Amino acid sequence: MNFYDSLKYDSQGLIPAVIQDAKTKEVLMVAYMNKEALKTTVETGKTHFWSRSRQKFWLKGESSGHTQSVKKMFLDCDLDTVVILVEQIGGACHEGYMSCFFRELDQKTLELKVTGKKVFDEKDVYKK
Amino acid sequence: MNFYDSLKYDSQGLIPAVIQDAKTKEVLMVAYMNKEALKTTVETGKTHFWSRSRQKFWLKGESSGHTQSVKKMFLDCDLDTVVILVEQIGGACHEGYMSCFFRELDQKTLELKVTGKKVFDEKDVYKK
C-alpha cells in the first residue's frame, strides 16, 4: 500500500495537520488535508490544505503571500494526524499574528489575553 | 456567554487539542475534547479527553500513570482548536515513545523512519 493510502482519513477524507515553526517550535496553526493536499504538500514543499468552510483546496499563502516551506513531517502512531515543521513567510494567522494561537487562557478567570506576536497588518495584506 | 460555550465544537461536539511539551515544545499528541473534558482539564490541571474510538471520557494516564499537568493553554483565532503546554509524566504515546509523532516521513522515498525517543516499555506499563 502506498503512503498516501495507508493514512487514516476521517469520514470526510481529511486528516488534521499541526503546523509548527521549525525554529521556535511554536504551533502556528491547525488545518486539514485531504489526500490531494497532502500529496501536493510533499511534492511541492509548500503546505496545501482543504478548507472545510470553503470546501476548497488551497495553497497556504495564495492570497497573502505568506507561504510555508516544509522542513520536516512526522506521522503519529495511529496514522491519522501529521505534524509539519515549516519556515513561515510573514505570519500564519489571517488576523496578522505569527500564530493562530495568539490568545492565552487564564485558567482561573477563563479570560483570553492576547500574548502572541503581531507581525503584519491584516488590512494591508488581505485588501481586495 | 461563558468561555466553554463560546468555543466552536464540531458536529460531534468536539475540538482538537494539540498537546505540546512545555519545555521542549515537542508536539506529544493530538486528541479530542468535548466541553466536559475541557472543563475538567481546566479545573483539575490534568488533561482529560473524549475518546472517539471508545466513546468514553478519559483522564490521560488513567491506566499508565502517565498524566499531563497543564502549564499553559492557548486558543486559536477561530476558537475551534486548543494548544495545551504540559509537563508529561513518562511518555505520551501508548507505544512507549515520548511523543506519538515518533516517525518522520522521508519526503523523497515516502518511507517512515523512527526518530522519536522511546521512554518506557509499553508491555510493562499496559500489562493487564
Image: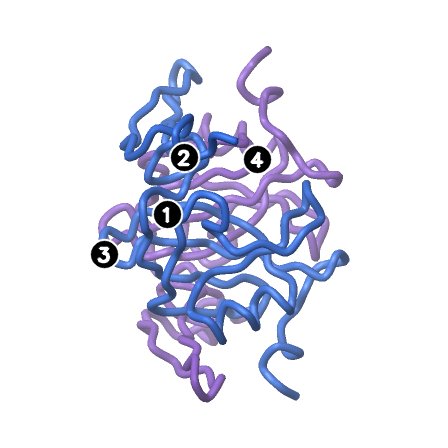
Chain colours: A purple, B blue
Q: As shown in the figure, which amino acid type bears the numbered disc 1?
A: Val
Q: Is residue B43 left or right of residue B107?
A: right
Q: CA distance from mark 2 to mark 1?
A: 22 Å
Q: As shown in the figure, which amino acid type bears the numbered disc 4?
A: Asp
> What x and y, as percent, mark residue B76?
49, 67
Reading the chain from its start, which is encountered first: label 2 or label 1? 1
Instruction: Report whether residue A128 is seen.
Output: no
Instruction: Report whether residue B5 is seen.
Output: yes
Q: CA distance from mark 3 to mark 1?
A: 11 Å
- Residues beneath discs 3 and 2 located on the same chain: yes
Front residue of B127/B73: it is: B127
Residue carrying label 4: A80
Residue carrying label 1: B27
SS state under label 1 = strand
Q: CA distance from mark 1 to mark 4?
A: 15 Å
Q: Residue at x 52, y 31 (%)?
A: B128
Q: As shown in the figure, which amino acid type bears the numbered disc 2?
A: Val
SS state under label 4 = loop
Which of labels 3 and 2 is toward the front? Answer: 2
Local crowd at mark 4 within 10 Å, few (<14), some, or many (≥20)? some
> What x and y, as percent, mark residue A95?
47, 72
Q: How many marks?
A: 4
Local crowd at mark 3 within 10 Å, few (<14), some, or many (≥20)? few
Q: As shown in the figure, which amino acid type bears the numbered disc 3?
A: Lys
Q: CA distance from mark 3 to mark 4?
A: 25 Å
